[in-house]
Image (cartoon, coloured by chain):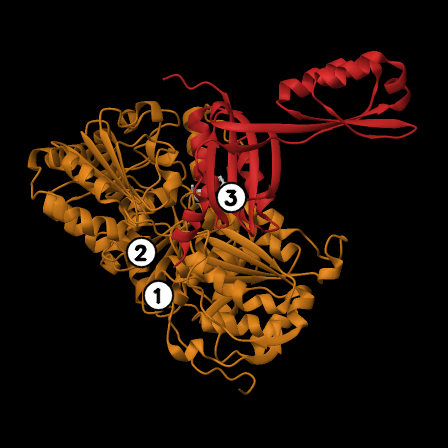
Chain colours: A red, B orange
Amino acid sequence: MKDDKKLYTISVYTENNIGLLNRISAIFQRRHINIESLNTSISEIPDVSRFTVVVRITESQVKKIIGQIAKQVEVIKAFYHTDDEIIYQESAIFKIASELLFEERQIQNIVKESHSRIVTVNKEFFVIEKSGRRSEIDELFENLKPFGIMQFSRSGRIAVSKDKMKISKVLNAFKH
Amino acid sequence: MKKNQVTKVRNTQTDQPRTSKRSQMKKSIHISGSEAVVRCLIEEGVDVLYGYPGGAIMPVYDELYKFQDHIHHVLTRHEQGATHAAQGYARISGRVGVAMATSGPGATNLVTGIADAQIDSTPLVCITGQVASHLLGSDAFQETDIVGISTPVTKWNHQITKASEIPEVMAKAFYIARSGRPGPVLIDITKDAQFEEFDFSYEKCKGVRSYNPVPVATENSLKSAADIINSAKKPMIVWGQGVILGKAEKNLIEMIEKTGIPAAWTILGASAIPTSHPLNVGMVGMHGNYGPNVLTNECDVLIAIGMRFDDRVTGNLDSYAKQAKVIHLEIDPAEVDKNVKTDVAIIGDARDSLRRLTPLLREKEHKEWLSKFTEFYKVEFETVIDADINPTKEGLTMGEVIKEINSCTNGDAAVVTDVGQHQMIACRYAKFTQTKSNITSGGLGTMGFALPAAIGAKMAEPEREVIAVIGDGGYQMTIQELGTIFQQRCAVKIVVLNNEYLGMVRQWQQLFFDKRYASTEMTNPDFVKIAEGYSIQSKRVSRREDLAPAVAEMVASDQAYFLEVCIEKEDNVFPMIPTGASVSDIRLE
Ligand SMILES: Cc1ncc(C[n+]2csc(CCOP(=O)(O)OP(=O)(O)O)c2C)c(N)n1
Ligand SMILES: [Mg+2]
């Protein structure tokens, strides 16, 4: 049976609880699985948090991981998706020296062509924001690198599924 | 309501949350967090808990002192002993065991027992004191992040920093520990929360919205399973502790008696149905019986009930029951397809699933198939069992000791074992007539488990004979609990099978490391003298003719009794599935 490693996006709906990040990340750590990216935020439902975890593992591994996550008391539901089943984004910000913006024409072209956005400009630096696929952000990084990037930070992947997640239905089913 | 006065004391914990109007409408009382903790325990029907005091939990101990007529706190001699005692209590009774410790070293000493309870699905509530909330994270005296440390080995854990959280969190703790697939819960309470006063009232937890402890098996899964079972020629059952935890013993017997299906057990499933039942074909796994192991690879349908295909059960997964259709009755969906791919998964509580499955099954007998197990048993008896339990050589064997215990107790005793050769021998040869009678550390294999677990078991069921069978190695890991036995006048019977070796490790060194006995030989103290130091009646036996009278004397005693049996030093446990081998490659010698 072919069971290749693939990129999976795991979405976990949970109660908002202090220890839960630790509990969930321990599930990966214990199996020696490297987390490619992790994002936590609120979800569409009040008082329900959402974890988005990206890992490169086999499908049989991801199924077991989902089982382990889902059985944690404060986890409402966990899903896994391949890239073609979701709409996903990452966001990155670049801090660049201000003089470059005015002196290097190329920089302005790069900003334009990459569909990134200048967030702020002051005397010393300006900040570019780019949302998109990892590859697009990587490309922008490579293009800006020669000019000198003062600081760089990229978010974890955030994603929504093409299919419905039906969390409210799950939540209602829990009501006793 | 007056202080220290409890409206009602229940000695037994009921499974179903009580919904009496009275308890729901109880008026609140203004008390401290620490008093609230004790009142919560009493509300949950806790009659005994095990623990060890220290700075950060002292306010709760002060309340335990005031409430000692309602709840009995047992001082163990080490916090690990407290968790194992709570486990023994839970395993024999099905009720939640409770352990308590102070912060820092007290809390970390609980971890082994918690991990053991997690992997063996034992309901525990562990309560730890913590430094005051304003000191959290400051490396205060005896501060340790026990919530962080215990996260991977608890079913749930939580830190309380405000007294007002206590009732709800405690109620949730007991509910989570005992419901669904049981497990350990740890509640860490800061010292300021223990002192803080608030308006207390208690309501049992009836559900947690993100937690569905008991999934209900679908009709479809039951029907598909029934179709497969009804057309099976050589079906076989392997049951595990899920049958005991789910109180499905009778349902299992009903099912096998209707269908004639031979049924084998994992080490934690032992005693769920009597050893003497004609369809009980013995133990599977590394040191299990010959027949059920070999025939796992010959059956056409394998029905796994409340077991989790541990590697000590399956041997090499690539050659485990590949020919069979696999049906898995399991309460925890995460166990399905974890190790063995199933054809039909029946996800639900063992009792409910079996109760609904059996009517769909056809009455049958599998005489010829069953006789195969008998044939294999004959071979095993001639090559292994006979020499184990009816030895003619000079040295005493572990097997004959277990046989002697069987005959003196008629199989009515609860046998608590530690980890090693003696454990495997005890599980192989102990005869059981009642469920919840085999208490051992299965998944974690924790040496030091048996002595404190036996204390908990005896205190939970004082009417039952509780016999701890322990190796000379493991005995010394928690030997200090003799102090607890002495102080509590706990009538456990302790049998140490002394081979002067870490026998199981020595066996592996003999078989797989060319007899290089690295650090497995022990120069032991005079165990009888040690027991005498605690005023425990004791005896050492090294000759065959003395064995039966000594076991009889031990069983006849109504107090604690220590019996050391000097065993042949280099005996091995067989059959054995070497690590990585297939169940059908089980070795008889
Ligand atoms: C806490 C702990 N440490 C180490 C081991 C590894 N181990 C498994 S069996 C065993 C030997 C046990 O010796 P003893 O208690 O004398 O029992 P015997 O095998 O001789 O019956 C050891 C060291 C363990 N299971 N638990
Ligand atoms: Mg030994």
Q: Residue at x 80, y 17 (%)?
A: A108
Q: Which residue is mark 3?
A: A13
Chain ID for label 1? Answer: B
Q: Quadrant of the C terminus of chain B?
A: top left
Q: Relative to B389, is B450 above or below?
A: below
Q: Is residue B339 left or right of residue B144?
A: left
State the residue lying farthest toward the bottom.
B2
Q: Which residue type does callout 3 highlight?
A: Tyr
Inter-mark Cα distance, 2 to 3 = 41 Å
Q: Amino acid at mark 1?
A: Gln
Residue type for callout 2: Ser
State ligand 2's quadrant: top left
The residue to which callout 2 is attached is: B437
For mark 3, give the secondary structure.
Answer: strand
The answer to whether marks 2 and 3 mark residues whose Cβ atoms lie closer than 8 Å is: no
Q: Residues within 10 Å of mark 1 (few under 14, many from 20)?
A: few
Q: Residue at x 68, y 18 (%)?
A: A138
